[in-house]
Amino acid sequence: MMTPAPTKIHYHKQSRELELAFADGQSFRLSAEYLRVHSPSAEVRGHGLQMPILQYGKKDVTIQNVEGAGNYALKISFNDGHDTGLYTWEYLYNLGKNQDELWKMYLDRLEKEGQTRDTSVIQLHQL
């Protein structure tokens, strides 16, 4: 089944959420932090690694710019300088559909690795 294209894309600056409505009637509000820590970029996904590289300290991240990439994706620029990786319609739809589960897995991994969402408490890994 092909992923429906978004019929609405709107960034709410106050709540720092990207609102997406899709042609099949589904709509999602995805926080800037959620989008940032689940970026499809190689920096986050890794280069062929099984486990994505944990992003932490992104609680206060905001979206600076959202632009279309062809008719299939968005390029999102964040205020921490991250702007690589294309968020395809399919990827965004899956982030929306699985938001509760993916967010819980992210929070569990942060805790397991001794990290935090808070930007003012960046902790160094023990080498």
Image (cartoon, rainbow, N blue to C red):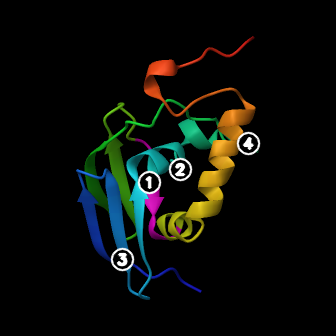
| Marks 2, 3: nearer the viewer | 3
Check the image and name the residue furthest to the top. Answer: 127
Of the residues shown, which amino acid type is indicated by label 2? Pro
Above or below, comparing residue 110 to residue 123 in the picture: below
Of the residues shown, which amino acid type is indicated by label 1? Leu
Where residue 55 sits in the image (x, y, percent)?
56, 35
Q: Is residue 82 magenta?
A: no
The answer to which quarter of the image holds residue 110 is top right
Alpha carbons under labels 1 and 3: distance apart: 18 Å
Alpha carbons under labels 2 and 1: distance apart: 6 Å
Few, some or many C-alpha atoms within 10 Å of disc 1 (few <14, some 14-19, many ≥20)?
some
- Counting residues from the N terminus, which is met first, the one under dot 1 or under dot 3? 3
- Counting residues from the N terminus, which is met first, the one under dot 2 or under dot 1? 2
Q: In the visual, does 106 lie left or right of 78?
A: right
Is residue 85 visible in the rendered image? The answer is no
Alpha carbons under labels 2 and 4: distance apart: 13 Å
Residue underneath mark 1: 86
Looking at the rendering, the stretch of residues picked out in magenta corresponds to: 84-90
> Secondary structure under badge 4?
loop
Where residue 46 sits in the image (x, y, percent)?
64, 39
| Marks 1, 3: nearer the viewer | 3
Residue drawn at x 59%, y 53% is 103
Residue underneath mark 3: 21
Above or below, comparing residue 92 to residue 37 in the picture: below
Few, some or many C-alpha atoms within 10 Å of disc 2 (few <14, some 14-19, many ≥20)?
some
Residue underneath mark 2: 40
